[in-house]
Image (cartoon, grey):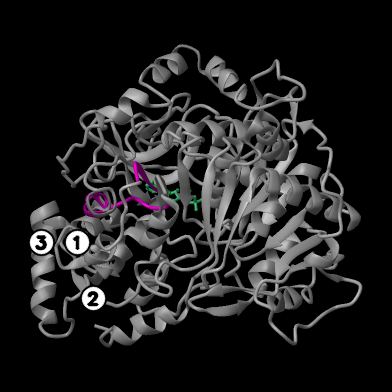
């Protein structure tokens, strides 16, 4: 990246104060920032007491060997006990933990008492399969209750899990099984996606033929779709209902050290071998629990929480499983896609269960915008009181649409910035405290230290852009990259000495609030200016005809890179009619919003964009297209055929 800091072009003046009623009853008030500022470690020690410890920690942070942190190191606890049993012991056994909604419409509600029985049986079953504390278990399941039960059963017996997205290929699964050296795989015959059964077990069978997976001795299979002619390896494969159902319903959880590993989760990264991000127990659970309580203002007696993420993404780990369940929440778990069997499915679910807090990704919000305002308008969404966003920068226009059409023009929207590596939310407004700015994650949470620095690592003044860094260790930070301490140091801690480099561009506005500007690998260099893809995309999305935009810098002989935009038009906009006219209109719109330097050289209307399973736009593939290159690695793409559609749309090389 050149020495010129990221240009900050976008001006967003809209402001939304917290609703007075919510502010008056909020779980966390402005005082928390003061407390954490005065005594950061004391603040986290207090938050750790949200949990039940078998041995209370006397130590908070051990940073004697940076960047290897230990939090609450002399404490001992059991994560599953904290997420399940203690709520039953506290008299909440009858409270619903999970309202499961299958894609075909089948439903199941599990109370905390049910969950305790299921997790206990699964823990016994894993033990019968020979799984011991420290052994890794791979989980490759659809979004069904057994996914949550399996994760908690692993946590209960101290066996780190490695959840792999149900949508990943046999190759991706094999790489992850190999790297983690997993001993057992938990899977299902299949799951439901887009109205039909989608098989999973065949990918496991295939993965287990690959070198490096020989240590897998058992495959535990949930029957979900009832698919016939399933290949079966005797002695290795075992049905969940045969093994788990006959286990005792009581299981005594054993406490583990606070630094005992909880899970490994692989981040795809844009290049290179996936990184196995390692999280441990005490600090991770402290921060997921606290942030879920603070950012969503969760009231466990009355709220119904719904995080739409897949459990294969860190958001599902922290805000379907560990955060909400440690707080005794009632939540929704939905198996399928938002448009099956119709584009109002999510809103129907909100209405049916009276969802009060919804946590989703910008990609889903932009899809809903594209499908049209009239669809959510058909449902009663009045139960909603807090809306959250995660995964990508949320374009201001999408933020305002979300608040208006889903949140009755009244609910706070919290834009939460964090990463697989950070384990929990790091930068976000608080719904009862912060005057919100659409498109900005705004402020580090109490106890979190983040800032923006320039190329030399100097903090930038308000109003300037650069790189996001975290300047103090935090409880749910990754502990290392599984099996590769050196890569952990190099990737995160070597760019700016003593500080964690997140890999994201960011700016501070005049009030010192933080705006995320996209991955630094995606930043464009145009005639000597660094321009953020996020800002150009947000300018495009602020045009009434555009639902979604992806912007890349393509090699250009005159300007180093030229801005190339791929746009999806909003529902009802006829394509083709006057495409040339529309493209000109959009180019002029961007120039007006951001200045002539940001005007895209090319704009291509397309019907889909390439995305990862967690909904992030894969700009590097679009760069390959824009530069007429063969496509790079597409294994983490939701739907590889999208790239054919886009390439077909492209005029012959200029
Ligand atoms: C939780 C999660 C992490 C990357 C991160 C950043 C982007 C996530 C964001 C956001 C702007 C937000 N990101 N939340 N960018 N605003 N609110 O997404 O983890 O899958 O590891 O991705 O996602 O680029 O560095 P992960």
Evaluate if marks 3 and 2 touch, with contact meaning CB atoms under 8 Å apart. no
Tell whether circle 1 marks a residue whose Cβ is less than 8 angstroms from ligand 1.
no
- Quadrant of the image containing the C terminus: bottom left
* Count of marks placed on residues: 3
**157 up-or-down from 406: above or below:** above
Separation of residues labelled 3 and 2 (CA atoms): 15 Å
Q: Is residue 115 magenta?
A: no
- Identify the residue at image location x=36%, y=76%: 625
Give whichever of discs 3 and 1 has the lower sequence position: 1
The residue labelled by disc 2 is: 604
Please tell me whether mark 1 sits on a helix, a strand or a loop.
Answer: helix
Pointer 3 residue: 589
Would you call the spot at circle 1 few (<14 residues within 10 Å), some (14-19), or many (20 or more)? many
What residue is disc 1 on? Answer: 540
Looking at the rendering, the stretch of residues picked out in magenta corresponds to 384-401
Q: Is residue 51 left or right of residue 452?
A: right
Question: In the rendered image, is residue 423 in sight?
Answer: no
Of mark 1 and mark 2, the one earlier in the sequence is 1
In the figure, residue 515 lies in which quadrant? top left
Is the residue 158 above or below the residue 613 in the image?
Answer: above
Q: CA distance from mark 1 to mark 2?
A: 12 Å
Q: Residue furthest top?
A: 38
Residue name at image x 36 percent, y 79 percent: 628
Horizontal side of 246 relative to 106 (left or right) equals right
**x and y, in percent, of residue 519 in the image:** 40, 52
Question: Residue 167 at x, y = what percent?
Answer: 57, 70
Which residue corresponds to the image point at 70% horizontal and 37% vertical from the top-left? 79
**Marked residue nearer the N-terminal end (3 or 2):** 3
Q: Is residue 612 visible?
A: yes
- The x, y position of residue 119, in whole percent, is 74, 49
């Amino acid at each position: 990246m050149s020495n010129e800091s990221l240009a900050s072009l976008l001006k967003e003046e809209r402001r939304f104060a917290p609703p007075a009623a919510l502010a008056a009853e909020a779980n966390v008030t402005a005082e928390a920032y003061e407390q954490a500022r005065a005594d950061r470690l004391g603040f986290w020690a207090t938050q750790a007491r949200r949990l039940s410890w078998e041995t209370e920690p006397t130590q908070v942070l051990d940073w004697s060997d940076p960047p290897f942190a230990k939090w609450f190191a002399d404490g001992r606890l059991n994560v599953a006990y904290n997420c399940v049993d203690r709520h039953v012991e506290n008299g909440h056994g009858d409270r619903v933990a999970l309202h499961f909604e299958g894609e075909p419409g089948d439903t199941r509600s599990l109370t905390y008492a049910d969950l305790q029985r299921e997790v206990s049986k699964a823990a016994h079953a894993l033990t019968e399969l020979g799984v011991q504390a420290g052994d890794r278990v791979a989980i490759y399941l659809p979004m069904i209750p057994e996914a949550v039960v399996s994760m908690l059963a692993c946590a209960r017996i101290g066996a780190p899990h490695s959840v792999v997205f149900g949508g990943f290929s046999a190759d991706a699964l094999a790489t992850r099984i190999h790297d983690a050296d997993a001993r057992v795989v938990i899977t299902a015959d299949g799951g439901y996606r887009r109205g039909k059964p989608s098989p999973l077990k065949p990918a496991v069978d295939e993965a287990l033929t690959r070198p490096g997976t020989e240590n897998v001795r058992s495959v535990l299979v949930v029957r979900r779709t009832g698919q016939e002619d399933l290949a079966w390896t005797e002695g290795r494969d075992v049905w969940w209902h045969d093994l788990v159902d006959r286990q005792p319903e009581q299981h005594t959880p054993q406490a583990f050290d606070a630094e005992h590993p909880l899970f490994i989760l692989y981040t795809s990264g844009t290049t290179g071998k996936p990184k196995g991000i390692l999280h441990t127990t005490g600090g991770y659970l402290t921060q997921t629990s606290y942030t879920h309580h603070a950012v969503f203002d969760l009231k466990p007696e009355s709220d119904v929480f719904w995080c739409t993420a897949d459990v294969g993404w860190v958001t599902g780990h922290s805000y379907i499983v560990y955060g909400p369940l440690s707080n005794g929440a009632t939540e929704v778990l939905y198996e399928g896609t938002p448009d099956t069997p119709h584009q109002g499915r999510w809103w129907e679910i909100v209405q049916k269960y009276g969802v009060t807090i919804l946590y989703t990704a910008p990609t889903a919000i932009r899809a809903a915008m594209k499908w049209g305002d009239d669809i959510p308008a058909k449902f009663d969404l009045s139960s909603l009181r807090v809306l959250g966003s995660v995964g990508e920068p949320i374009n201001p226009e999408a933020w305002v649409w979300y608040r208006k059409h889903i949140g009755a023009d009244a609910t706070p929207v919290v834009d939460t910035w964090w990463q697989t590596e950070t384990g929990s939310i790091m930068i976000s407004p608080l719904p009862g405290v912060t005057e919100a700015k659409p498109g900005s994650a705004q402020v580090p949470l109490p106890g979190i230290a983040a800032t923006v620095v320039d190329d030399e690592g100097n903090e930038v003044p308000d109003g300037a852009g650069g790189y996001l860094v975290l300047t103090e260790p935090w409880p749910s930070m990754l502990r290392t990259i599984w099996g590769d301490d050196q890569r952990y140091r190099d990737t995160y801690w070597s760019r700016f000495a003593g500080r964690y480099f997140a890999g994201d561009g960011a700016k501070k506005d005049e009030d010192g609030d933080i705006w995320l500007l996209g991955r630094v690998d995606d930043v464009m260099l145009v005639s000597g200016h660094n321009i953020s893809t996020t800002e150009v995309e947000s300018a495009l999305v602020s045009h009434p005809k555009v639902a979604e935009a992806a912007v890349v810098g393509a090699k250009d002989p005159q300007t180093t890179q030229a801005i190339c935009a791929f746009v999806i038009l909003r529902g009802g906009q006829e394509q083709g009619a006057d495409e040339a006219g529309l493209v000109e209109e959009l180019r002029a719109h961007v120039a007006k919003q951001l200045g002539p330097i940001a005007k895209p050289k090319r704009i291509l209307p397309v019907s889909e964009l390439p995305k990862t399973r967690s909904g992030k736009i894969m700009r590097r593939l679009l760069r390959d297209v824009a530069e007429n290159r063969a496509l790079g690695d597409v294994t983490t793409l939701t739907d590889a055929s999208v790239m054919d559609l886009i390439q077909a749309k492209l005029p012959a090389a200029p």
